[in-house]
Image: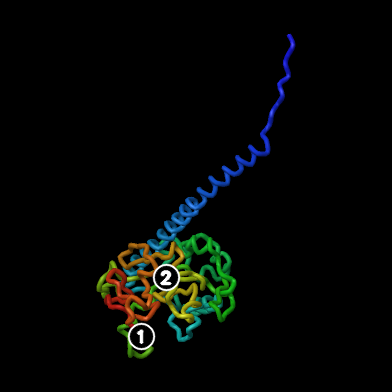
């Protein structure tokens, strides 16, 4: 029997181009959805970290007569409070000081390491997946323009860069006119809070000067990756908003323009400051922060 040879026919160039075009269109349609899903997953991980900080704080205050940890080193140097170097962290550790600052006092309550543990491994602190680390911040990276000391000093090898920060204005209204010594001895207790479910413990803190929107001043714009926070340093990296942890341990997402006054809707409140939301109290008595 005679077999008939059939000609094998491949795709023409036109057909290949059509297939490629279809794939490109489908990819263009899917990528935004995938990007949104990734952002949501990162925000969910950040929310989990925020709740962990709240839980750690609640356990700490139970152990220490309801006293909150400090939001920063209790020293006179602004740089050591805002931008402590790794060498500062080491010095305070050697002097057995700073153990009651939140970033040293709280991590062990949720199986984490205090900041002092990372002194010998600064790069590990910057890249390790831990409760100190916001996945969105890691994925965005740091802006090289912020690395010089006069523009934020965002250099992970020189100082710890914080993604989360403790409320720095909790006693600001009440300590006006007090001496520095009196302020240093003002220990805020959980039992003193007017509205525990509205009192801010922690929030995402800005770590890029190009994080937008931003209503603060040019000077505030380079207050980056600091261990303590207020509206002037509130981040907007999660879809123009960020997360806040409250003293009753719950954490919630808020849009930046809800948390921070824009200076327009109410001109009596300076842009970048506390608009006095009843559900977001930076002051422990629930009053808007005025200084």
Q: What is the number of callouts on the image?
A: 2
Quadrant (top left/top right/bottom left/bottom right) for the N terminus: top right
Q: Secondary structure at mark 1?
A: helix
Percent across and percent down for residue 61 are 33, 70
Between label 2 and label 1, give the one nearer the viewer.
Answer: 1
- Front-most of residues 11 and 233: 11
Percent across and percent down for residue 234 are 42, 71
Percent across and percent down for residue 112 are 46, 62
Query: Compared with residue 133, is residue 78 higher up or lower down, i.e. above or below?
Result: below
At 65% across and 39% down in the image, what residue appears? 14
Say which label, 2 or 1, has the lower sequence index: 2
- Front-most of residues 27 and 223: 27
Residue 287 lies in what quarter of the image?
A: bottom left
Q: Is residue 110 left or right of residue 192?
A: right
Query: Compared with residue 162, is residue 78 higher up or lower down, i.e. above or below?
Result: below
Determine which of the numbered discs, if any, sits on residue 207 in the image.
none
Query: Compared with residue 84, is residue 42 higher up or lower down, i.e. above or below?
Result: above
Measured Cα–Cα span from mark 2 to mark 1 = 20 Å
Q: Is residue 100 visible?
A: no
Instruction: State the residue position of label 2.
Output: 105
Instruction: State the residue position of label 1.
Output: 183
- Front-most of residues 258 and 83: 258
Q: Is residue 231 visible?
A: yes
Percent across and percent down for residue 127 are 55, 63
At 59% across and 44% down in the image, what residue appears? 21
At 67% across and 35% down in the image, what residue appears? 12
**Residue sitting at the far top:** 1
Q: Secondary structure at mark 2?
A: helix
Quadrant (top left/top right/bottom left/bottom right) for the C terminus: bottom left
């Amino acid at each position: 029997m005679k077999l008939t040879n059939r000609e094998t026919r491949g795709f023409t160039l036109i057909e290949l181009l059509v297939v490629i075009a279809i794939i490109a269109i489908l990819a263009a349609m899917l990528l935004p959805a995938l990007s949104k899903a990734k952002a949501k997953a990162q925000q969910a991980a950040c929310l989990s970290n925020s709740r962990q900080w709240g839980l750690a704080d609640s356990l700490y205050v139970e152990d220490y007569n309801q006293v909150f940890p400090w939001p920063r080193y209790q020293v006179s140097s602004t740089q050591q409070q805002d931008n402590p170097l790794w060498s500062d962290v080491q010095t305070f550790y050697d002097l057995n000081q700073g153990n009651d600052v939140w970033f040293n006092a709280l991590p062990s309550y949720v199986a984490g390491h205090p900041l002092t543990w990372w002194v010998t491994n600064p790069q590990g602190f910057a890249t390790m997946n831990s409760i100190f680390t916001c996945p969105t911040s890691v994925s965005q990276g740091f802006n090289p323009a912020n690395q010089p000391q006069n523009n934020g000093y965002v250099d992970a090898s020189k100082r710890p860069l914080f993604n989360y920060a403790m409320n720095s204005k909790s006693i600001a209204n009440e300590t006006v006119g007090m001496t520095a010594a009196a302020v240093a001895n003002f220990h805020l207790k959980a039992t003193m809070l007017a509205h525990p479910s509205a009192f801010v413990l922690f929030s995402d803190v800005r770590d890029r000067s190009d994080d937008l929107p931003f209503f603060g001043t040019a000077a505030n714009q380079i207050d980056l990756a600091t261990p303590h926070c207020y509206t002037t340093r509130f981040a907007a990296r999660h879809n123009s908003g960020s997360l806040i942890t409250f003293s009753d341990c719950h954490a919630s997402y808020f849009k930046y323009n809800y948390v921070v006054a824009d200076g327009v809707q109410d001109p009596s409140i300076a842009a970048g400051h506390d608009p006095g939301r009843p559900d977001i109290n930076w002051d422990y008595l629930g009053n808007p922060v005025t200084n």
